[in-house]
Amino acid sequence: MKTVFYFTTDWCGSCKKVQPIVEDMRKEGFQFQMIDADYEQLLVKNFNVKSVPTFILMENDKELNRITGVKSREELEGFVKNEII
């Protein structure tokens, strides 16, 4: 099953803009794992996250793709469906 690791922080304005989209998609069954980059520094380091928001598409413990920044719902859906390369 594909899961999106969503690296975010409480203070990030861009993260706050995309948060309602992520929440709506979660309610519809999309798998997002919220990761607070301020508290999960080991994950930030292991995944080489340089900015937030960062979305990393994972399947079977393998990174398939990643995007950063504010994205529209259409962009996030395409990303999750692995249509954005």
Image: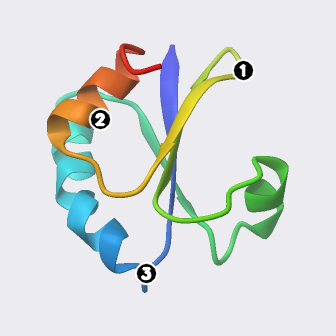
Q: Position of residue 37 (x, y in %)?
A: 62, 68
Counting residues from the N terminus, which is met first, the one under dot 2 or under dot 1? 1
Q: Position of residue 47 (x, y in %)?
A: 75, 47
Q: Residues within 10 Å of mark 1 (few under 14, many from 20)?
A: few
> Where does label 2 land, which residue?
76
Q: Amino acid at mark 3?
A: Asp
- Residue reaching furthest to the front: 85
Up-down relation of residue 47 to residue 7 (above or below): above
Counting residues from the N terminus, which is met first, the one under dot 2 or under dot 3? 3
The reply to whether the C-beta atoms of the residues labelled 3 and 1 are less than 8 Å apart is: no
Q: Which secondary structure lies at badge 3?
A: loop
Q: Nearer the viewer, mark 2 or mark 3?
A: 2
Report whether 85 appears left or right of 59.
Answer: left
Counting residues from the N terminus, which is met first, the one under dot 3 or under dot 1? 3
Q: Position of residue 72 (x, y in %)?
A: 19, 45
Q: Position of residue 20 (x, y in %)?
A: 18, 58
The reply to whether the C-beta atoms of the residues labelled 2 and 3 are less than 8 Å apart is: no
Q: Disc 2 versus disc 1: distance between alpha carbons?
A: 19 Å
Q: Amino acid at mark 1?
A: Lys
> Where does label 1 land, which residue?
62
- Residue reaching furthest to the bottom: 11
Q: Residues within 10 Å of mark 2 (few under 14, many from 20)?
A: many
> Where does label 3 land, which residue?
10
Q: Residue at x 48, y 35 (%)?
A: 4
Q: Nearer the viewer, mark 2 or mark 1?
A: 2
Q: Amino acid at mark 2?
A: Leu
Up-down relation of residue 3 to residue 47 (above or below): above
Q: Residue at x 68, y 14 (%)?
A: 60
